Image: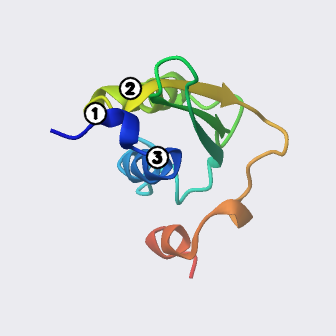
Amino acid sequence: MKDLREVTPEQTKERVIEELKKIYDPELPVDIYNLGLIYDVDCWKDDVSKLNKCKITMTLTSPTCSMSETIVDLVKSIPSRMEGDLLELDVEIVFDPPWDQNKMSDEAKLAMGML
């Protein structure tokens, strides 16, 4: 059994990004990471527990996105899928800068028929 205190923040960040790539916008055939909705994933070691915490700064395709609650709930549920590697995950929704299609990866543009 691994000692979860030995999991580095960088390893946790990689795992969080893997999980983000499994979350799809229900209205689009692209995951939210490649769609460009994730602006930042910041992970660090908690001083007390010595376990990792992360903060995700993200946006939505529109402030009136009908699936916003579902998407955010899926992001917030990431720690439950990480076998204890992640003590806590905070999610901050921002609309500045606003999302636009230029934030999409080439993979996402290809999936949407834009390339």
Q: Residue furthest bottom?
A: 115
Residue ID for mark 2: 77
Q: Residue at x 41, y 31 (%)?
A: 86
The residue sitting at 30% across, 28% down in the picture is 84
Instruction: Judge depth for marks 1 and 3 and give the one in front.
Output: 3
Tell me the kind of residue under disc 3: Thr
Quickly name the residue at label 3. Answer: 8
Q: Quadrant of the N terminus?
A: top left
Q: Looking at the rendering, in which quadrant would you find the C terminus? A: bottom right
Mark 1 or mark 3: name the one nearer the start of the chain. 3
Q: In the figure, 111 relative to 48: above or below?
A: below
**Which three-letter amino acid code belongs to the residue tagged 1?**
Arg
Looking at the image, which is closer to me, 33 or 3? 3
Which mark identifies residue 81?
Answer: 1
- Residue at position x 52%, y 53% from top? 33
Q: Are marks 2 and 1 in contact (CB under 8 Å)?
A: yes
Left or right, 105 with respect to 6, comes to right
